[in-house]
Image: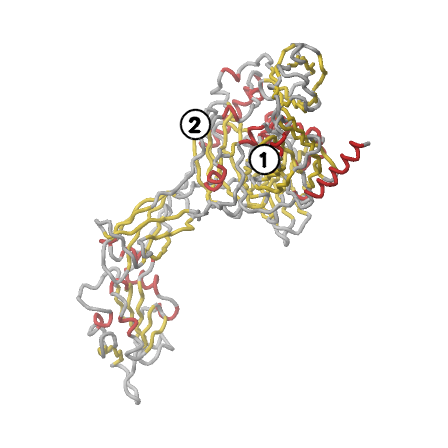
């Protein structure tokens, strides 16, 4: 009775301690999930993907650049892409070479911010590539079964004299769980207990080591083989932590067996999620035990790492548990309105979100076959919520976990996948924010006087950016007092030509020095530590299956070779006079007329005289226009062809079609514009009946250079360079059969759309797709997130 009352007291006491357990985002790491249209491909096929970036289950806003590499199983990079991130997602495709060997490959993906913050490897996603024409020997025959078993102490160590929980996992050489039974023996050879797996080769047992030494187990495997396996070494002293489920949260029990009891002074229980400390509370031990409840109501879904730590941050024991919050998922319904399994038949589906929210999702429809059954598209819930563990390898759908796996089975996954190393290597944020200087593609550097190291400390830089499609854009940026410049937020594909020019009252030549883009490279990968891959699922020992796969691969090869050539088109054009081109480029409205106009094209025929400004240049060049200098920059401009009873008839002066005035002081602004910055001058006399409303004296229009004209205006001071942009991407073509088509159709991906956006006004998304040949089963995968921080994770098989 004494211990029962003590246990109840401890639970109440600890519950009060942890009642304030809460979670807030400060500097959480980015997690990334990649939704590919399918999980296996043929050599020569194309991977279509949409990647979702989240921070503590909310769409990430830190990074703007996403990197993805295709690796072989030796870690060698086959291809790389850089893609812009918008609103927490990135969309792209990767073409698989025809020359790829049959086997497993990896998609390595990351951001600069992720690698800077975690100092760890990039995320990996395995994909299977099928190529019966280039198949290694290991995929051509079946292997004799090989088994292995591993033991996992609940909190990382087995401590003498304490009640230790030991989880185990039995697998074959391909990562498949195998049923086993076993007997535990003491170092003296005494039989202590029997055990067997409870779920997919996994199970657990508890025992108290009474003596130090080598404990071992005899394991009986399915084929009748009996093997002896050692347990991890027993430690003389230490601390254990045990976790159990409770309706109010997680029950914890911390046990100690320490020679020096003073070590328990200042011991805390830490909770860490997404590299954030969510609670840090002192532990009180009574007779070597500390117990309590950790409330989880206010915690997000994901992995909770629980550490017993000293005041000097020495970890004495650790345990990981999964927090499953149904509120972390948005409710989605899939309604097949019309399904037809005939060849090339049309099918119609509608998707509906029950809540009034905004969401970004991707939708894929796959023609099911034996390979599709083997390689399922990973769950966004599994990946984003369990990103710190190897559980992302397993095809567990977290949102449906209550219906598919028991609580005990979930916990066994954690005990047999998360080892002490995963916690020991974890970095706890100290809230030192990593500066985010990334803003898409950035041009940063310094400006120097040509041939020197002396910085230019004022003025502007003008840039003309020209793409391969002849499209061009014009930008300008200020030069700082230290000679630096920064042009960011550029988004473009492929390499572009960047021309630049220094513009100021000073006519000097410059050199531009670009800062190198700082990229954090992933660590060198050891893919053998990634986890066991199901190589047996890629076996090509069945002759009929291999013949079918060969035909399938040839179909893709022929499809990729199909090139549409347009018939020759002859286009006849008339070359326009340069002044007509310039007039159209700069003028608008009533000012675009050339009737009776006197024009000066300063771009194609730049002024050669020594005139100080435009008015000096125009003196005597326009009949009927009188220019009278009244001061250094004051001019009086009148029309000699018009008469007024009140005296002089003044000419309106416009700069870029904005009036600057009539009198001498008003027009001085136009007199200060350097001639080399003027593109076009046009005088429209007032007597023109075709141009009403421009005044009796007419209008003198002055246009300053813009865009490529500004850059090219001083070609002797214009320089250019090539600069790489984002990787080019293609759009997926969803097949449409508007009439009977008798050509073969062996597609696996029947529909792919990464651009699905749900809004409160449009909560339903309808789409259709056409069946391929000889398919009687569809798999629909819908994944994404809402912008209020919930995940969308849905999979449905229709047959």
Residue 253 spot, x, y in % from top left: 69, 32
Q: Which residue is mark 2?
A: 76
Give me the residue at 76% from left, 38% from top: 9
User: Quarter-wise, where is residue 745 in the image?
Assistant: top right
Location of residue 180 with respect to 744 vertically, above or below: above
Question: For this rendering, which residue is in front, 757 or 21?
Answer: 21
Position of the N terminus by quadrant? top right
Which class describes the residues within 10 Å of circle 2: few (<14), some (14-19), or many (20+)? some
Residue 179 spot, x, y in % from top left: 68, 18
565 with respect to 61 (left or right) = left
Q: Which residue is mark 1?
A: 310
Q: Kindly give the residue lying farthest to the right in the view shown.
A: 1
Position of the C terminus by quadrant? top right
137 with respect to 613 (left or right) = right
Number of numbered discs: 2
Question: For this rendering, which residue is in front, 264 or 13?
Answer: 264
Give me the residue at 71% from left, 12% from top: 191
Location of residue 105 with respect to 21 vertically, above or below: above
Residue 372 spot, x, y in % from top left: 60, 28
Residue 239 spot, x, y in % from top left: 63, 28
Question: For this rendering, which residue is in front, 175 or 371?
Answer: 175
Which class describes the residues within 10 Å of circle 1: few (<14), some (14-19), or many (20+)? some
Element carrying mark 1: loop
Q: Is residue 24 visible?
A: yes
Element carrying mark 2: loop
Give me the residue at 52% from left, 45% from top: 431
Which of pointers 2 and 1 lies earlier in the amino acid sequence?
Answer: 2
Distance CA(mark 2)–CA(mark 1): 42 Å
């Amino acid at each position: 009775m004494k211990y029962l009352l003590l246990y109840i007291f401890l639970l109440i006491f600890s519950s009060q301690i942890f009642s304030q357990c809460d979670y807030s985002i400060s500097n959480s790491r980015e997690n990334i999930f990649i939704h590919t249209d399918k999980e296996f491909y043929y050599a020569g096929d194309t991977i279509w993907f949409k990647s979702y970036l989240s921070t503590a289950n909310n769409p990430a806003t830190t990074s703007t650049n996403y990197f993805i590499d295709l690796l072989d199983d030796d870690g060698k990079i086959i291809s790389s892409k850089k893609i812009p991130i918008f609103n927490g997602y990135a969309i792209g495709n990767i073409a698989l070479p025809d020359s790829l060997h049959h086997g497993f490959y990896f998609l390595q993906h990351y951001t600069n911010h992720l690698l800077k913050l975690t100092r760890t490897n990039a995320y990996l996603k395995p994909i299977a590539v099928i190529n019966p024409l280039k198949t290694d020997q290991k995929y051509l025959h079946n292997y004799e079964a090989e088994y292995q078993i591993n033991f996992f102490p609940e909190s990382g160590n087995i401590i003498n004299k304490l009640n230790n929980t030991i989880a185990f996992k039995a697998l074959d050489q391909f990562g498949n769980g195998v049923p086993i039974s076993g007997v535990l023996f003491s170092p003296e050879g005494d039989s202590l207990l029997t055990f067997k797996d409870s779920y997919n080769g996994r199970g657990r047992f508890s025992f108290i080591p009474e003596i130090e030494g080598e404990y071992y187990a005899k394991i009986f495997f399915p084929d009748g083989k009996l093997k002896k396996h050692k347990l991890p070494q027993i430690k003389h002293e230490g601390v254990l932590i045990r976790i159990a489920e409770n309706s109010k949260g997680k029950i914890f029990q911390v046990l100690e067996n320490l020679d020096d009891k003073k070590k328990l002074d200042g011991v805390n229980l830490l909770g860490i999620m997404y590299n954030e400390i969510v609670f840090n509370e002192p532990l009180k031990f009574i007779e070597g035990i500390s117990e309590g409840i950790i409330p989880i109501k206010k915690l997000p879904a994901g992995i909770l790492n629980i550490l017993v730590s000293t005041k000097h941050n020495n970890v004495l024991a650790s345990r990981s548990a999964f927090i499953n919050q149904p509120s972390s998922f948005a409710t989605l319904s899939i309604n097949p309105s019309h399904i037809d399994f005939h060849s090339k038949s049309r099918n119609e589906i509608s998707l509906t979100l029950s809540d009034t929210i905004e969401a970004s999702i991707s939708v894929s429809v796959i023609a099911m076959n034996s390979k599709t059954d083997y390689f399922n598209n990973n769950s966004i819930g599994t990946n984003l919520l369990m990103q710190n563990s190897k559980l992302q390898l397993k095809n567990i759908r977290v949102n449906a976990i209550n219906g598919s796996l028991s609580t005990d089975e979930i916990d066994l996954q954690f005990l047999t996948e998360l080892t002490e190393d995963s916690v020991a290597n974890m970095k706890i944020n100290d809230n030192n924010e990593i500066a985010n200087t990334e803003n898409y593609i950035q041009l940063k550097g310094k400006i120097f006087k040509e041939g020197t190291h002396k910085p230019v400390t004022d003025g502007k830089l003008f840039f003309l950016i020209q793409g391969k499609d002849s499209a061009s854009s014009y930008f300008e940026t200020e030069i700082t007092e230290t000679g630096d410049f920064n042009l960011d937020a550029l988004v473009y594909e492929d390499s572009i030509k960047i021309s630049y020019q220094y513009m100021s009252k000073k006519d000097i030549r410059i050199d531009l020095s670009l800062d190198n883009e700082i990229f954090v490279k992933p660590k060198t990968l050891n893919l053998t530590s990634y986890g066991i891959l199901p190589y047996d699922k890629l076996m090509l020992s069945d002759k009929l299956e291999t013949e079918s796969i060969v035909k399938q691969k040839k179909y893709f090869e022929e499809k990729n070779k199909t090139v549409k050539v347009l018939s020759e088109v002859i286009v006849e054009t008339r070359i326009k006079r340069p002044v007509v081109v310039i007039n159209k480029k700069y003028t608008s409205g009533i000012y675009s007329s050339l009737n009776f106009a006197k024009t000066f094209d300063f771009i194609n025929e730049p002024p050669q005289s020594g005139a100080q400004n435009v008015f000096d240049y125009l003196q005597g060049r326009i009949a009927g226009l009188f220019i009278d200098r009244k001061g250094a920059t004051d001019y009086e401009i009148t029309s000699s062809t018009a008469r007024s009873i009140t005296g002089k008839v003044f000419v309106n002066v416009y700069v870029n079609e904005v009036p600057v005035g009539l009198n001498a002081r008003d027009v001085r602004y136009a007199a200060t514009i350097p001639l080399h910055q003027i593109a076009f001058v046009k005088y429209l006399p007032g007597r023109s009946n075709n141009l009403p409303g421009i005044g009796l004296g007419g209008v003198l229009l002055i246009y300053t250079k813009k865009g490529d004209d500004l850059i090219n205006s001083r070609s002797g001071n214009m320089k250019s360079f090539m600069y790489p942009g984002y990787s080019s991407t293609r759009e997926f073509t969803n097949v449409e059969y508007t009439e009977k088509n008798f050509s073969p159709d062996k597609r696996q991906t029947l529909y792919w759309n990464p651009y699905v956006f749900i809004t409160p006004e449009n909560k339903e998304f309808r789409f259709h797709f056409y069946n391929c040949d000889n398919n009687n089963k569809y798999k629909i995968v819908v994944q994404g997130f809402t912008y209020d921080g919930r995940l969308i994770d849905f999979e449905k098989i229709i047959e």
